[in-house]
Amino acid sequence: MIQRIVFNGICIIIIISMLIGCGGKGGRLTNEQEVYCGKWETYSGDYICINADGSAQGTIHNTNFMAAHVFISNTTLIVTEMGTKKQYCITKQPTEQYGEWTMKLDSMKFYKRIDY
């Protein structure tokens, strides 16, 4: 009887944790934030794909995320996935110069892929 109560309690905690982790949906990006949409890559192989619906996937600093949500402010880009959260400092907003888009996260320079 006690084992069943403990088991049910653990199951409830796991389900609630999963719902909280998946429920932090970023939502659609604002018009001002849509400049972040697309695939951004570094020369070292790190990348992030940001979609207009607020979803993201990529690899930054050896951290992989596939079904993540992104939250963007003026100074930070936050990626959440299954209850985990990773925050990156936006050290340079996305800018275009000579037809090339760049931005910096944690001082890492990202280039926007046009063919994405």
Image: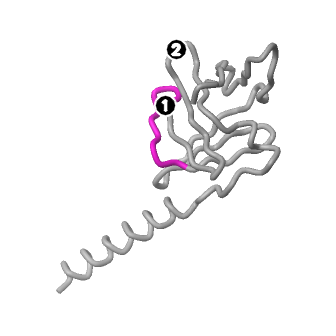
Residue at 72% across / 24% down in the picture?
103
Give the x, y percent position of residue 12: 36, 75
Image position of 58 (left or right of 32):
left
Seen at 46% across and 54% down, the residue is 82
Please state which amino acid type lies under the numbered disc 1: Thr
In the rendered image, the quadrant that contains the N terminus is: bottom left
The answer to whether residue 107 is magenta is no
Which quadrant is the C terminus positioned in?
top right
* Residue segment shown in magenta: 60-68
- The residue labelled by disc 1 is 59
Main secondary structure of the magenta stretch:
strand
Q: Quadrant of residue 41?
A: top right
In the figure, 7 relative to 23: above or below? Answer: below
Find residue 51 and report its image quarter: top right
Q: Is residue 38 above or below residue 54?
A: above
The amino acid pointed to by label 2 is Ser
Graded by Cα atoms within 10 Å as few (under 14), some (14 to 19) or many (20 or more), the crowding at tag 2 reads few
Q: Is residue 77 above or below residue 105?
A: below
Q: In this figure, which colouring scheme has been used for the structure?
A: one colour
Return the x and y of residue 83 as percentages of the image width and height: 49, 55
Q: Residue furthest bottom?
A: 1
Q: CA distance from mark 1 to mark 2?
A: 11 Å
| Residue tagged 2 | 44
The percent position of residue 39, horizontal first and vertical second, equals: 59, 31
Write the residue at 70% across / 32% down. 89
Q: Give 114 or 87, whichever is nearer the viewer.
A: 114
Q: Label 2 near label 1: C-beta < 8 Å?
A: no
Q: Disc number at residue 116?
A: none
